[in-house]
Image (tube, rainbow, N blue to C red):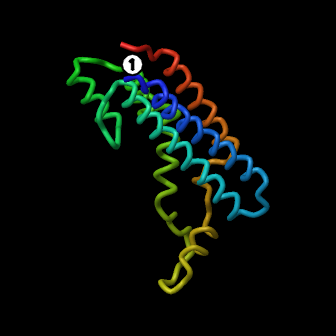
Amino acid sequence: MADKPRVARYQADRTNQKFYFCRLACVEAGKAVDKQQYQAHCETAIFHLHGAYLAFLQELAHFYNLDTTSPSLTSIETGLASKTLVSPEIERLKQSKEQGILANVLNAFKRCQYAPTPEQGLTTEPSADLIVNVVTMSNQWLPDEQTIREWRQLMMTMVDEMRGGMVEY
């Protein structure tokens, strides 16, 4: 247990690093000169916000000494229940996932994972270049970089507040 502070610090650093990468992607999106670059940077920012969420779950799992390689809200909650513990952080994340900042980020991340459906009247041929088709379709579903910046700030605030409430048990 002597090395726990160093390892715990690494866990927090990884979460913070993902927030930093999101900020960099938003800066690049703001500088983008065409639609494809803008879309790529916005999607990258969303991927990093999702990564910050996953990194924070790892941080929580480590904080509560849970042995899990891929922590999720459910696995952490189950692990804590076996120790007869309850995590206020998990409850807050669950609420945010249902209707809050985390719901927005996870929805945007999910939308980034699938090719957008063609607009009315737009047809794609099987032999057509898939990448060109995806980036030339409407990306109205994609949040702009200002919205992503706001999500990043809200998530950082939420994580910082949760970290402030985490105490050794």
Q: Is residue 1 left or right of residue 81?
A: right
Percent coordinates x, y for residue 80 in the rendering = 27, 24
Percent coordinates x, y for residue 114 in the rendering = 47, 61
Residue at the left extreme, as displayed: 82
Disc 1 crowd, CA 10 A, few/some/many (<14, 14-19, 20+)? few
Residue closer to the observer: 34 or 53: 53
Q: Residue at x 37, y 23 (%)?
A: 1
Does residue 93 lie above or below 47 as drawn? above
Q: Is residue 163 left or right of residue 44?
A: left
Residue closer to the observer: 47 or 60: 60
Q: How many marks?
A: 1
| Image quadrant where one finds the C terminus | top left
Residue closer to the observer: 64 or 6: 6
Q: State the image quarter where residue 134 is shown.
A: bottom right
Residue designated by label 1: 88
Residue closer to the observer: 169 or 96: 169
Percent coordinates x, y for residue 8 in the rendering = 46, 28
Q: Residue at x 30, y 38 (%)?
A: 68
Q: Mark 1 belongs to which amino acid? A: Pro
Q: Residue at x 76, y 50 (%)?
A: 30
Does residue 164 lie above or below 119 as drawn? above
Q: Is residue 142 left or right of residue 61?
A: right
Percent coordinates x, y for residue 116 in the rendering = 52, 63
Local secondary structure at mark 1: helix
Residue at the front extreme, as displayed: 2
Q: Residue at x 44, y 31 (%)?
A: 59
